Amino acid sequence: MASELLTTLHVKYIQSLDNRKDDLAYHLTTHLRLNGIYWGLTALCIMGRQDALPREEMIEFVMNCWDDDVGAFGAYPGHDAHILSTLSAIQILIMQDALDRVDVGRVTGFILSLQQPSGAFAGDRFGETDTRFLYCSISALSLLGRLPALDRAGIDGRARAVAHVVKCKNVDGGFGLAPGAESHSGQAFVCVGALAILDRLDAIDVDTLAWWLAERQLPSGGLNGRPEKLEDVCYSFWVLSALSALNKLSWIDADKLSAFILSAQDPDAGGIADRPGNTADVFHTHFGIAGLSLLGYPHLEDLDPVYCMPARVIERLNLRKAWTALSRREG
């Protein structure tokens, strides 16, 4: 069981992911391909190895995912556009300094078309709503510099979005995917993140939500998504990001959580799993490294918890909010 971050192995693991085209799993996950590239690239950036993947090849693939019928991005060439893959595309292109290749006006129009009269956002033209889609829409508009477009032609889109998030708040302080839905750590991140971008964290019962999030830590040191569930490395980001935005990150036992994340590494092939002994994947690798960055783990770059991107990138865009991570420790 590794007691330190196996950076070199993780870089090799991420580099190997596009060389597995003979595996059935590679083809069964095309609906996550653009998200996967974002997860891998962001993890590499936080480890200081953004150059480990070919820039031009990556940009070309992202642009091949463009859905010209609606003006947004699908998860894979030929797939229908969705807000989840559209946000990932925007994040990748910004990190690769290639946003100039996007028709920002068309993407903005696509995102605005997803907002419902309730203030919720659909993921695509088929109309399913979820607080995840609201966060992705708000984050994407902010990254594009088009957040003011929410308020247009007599439509107060910003206020409607805030009102919908507030309706998703529960008595325990947490948030669900829709009004009345069970509180979940992932939904806490997206709701806190959206409110942070909209400068409306005042709508949150900070102490109650922070208490609920801190209660997600189990004796193993890991965090779960909701009561009575197993710990999972991905919640190292979902919980910590929300606590960081609320300036309550010290409510978590950082040493125990760091040890849990490190114990889920694959010491042979690299990558991080959901929990020790399971198979590594790029999703948990990304969110495990993101969590370690927020915990101040040595030799990692700072991660912005609101946008889940390198802090230097968000600062360059003048979008940084008032979040607090733990101080970077010396290795």
Image (spheres, rainbow, N blue to C red):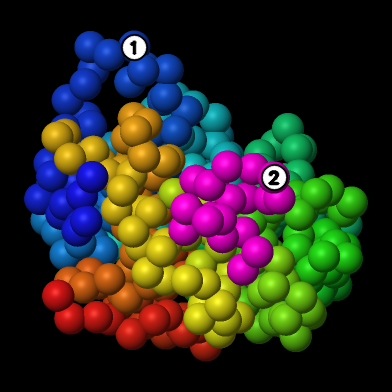
Examine the rendering and report whether any part of residue 160 can be seen. no
**In the depicted view, which residue is nearer to us: 1 or 113?**
1
In the rendered structure, find residue 213 and report the number of the disc placed on it: none
Examine the rendering and report whether any part of residue 77 can be seen. yes
Q: Which residue is pictured at 83% across the width and 48% down the height?
A: 181
Quadrant location of residue 254?
bottom left
Q: Which residue is pictured at 39% across the width and 44% down the height?
A: 284
Q: Amino acid at mark 1?
A: Leu
Q: Which residues are magenta?
A: 214-232
Q: What residue does disc 2 label?
A: 228
Q: Amino acid at mark 2?
A: Glu
Above or below — where is 51 with respect to 207?
above
Q: Which residue is pictured at 65% across the width and 64% down the height?
A: 215
Mark earlier in primary sequence (2, 1): 1
For the stretch drawn in magenta, the main secondary structure is loop
Q: Which residue is pictured at 42% across the width and 80% down the height?
A: 325
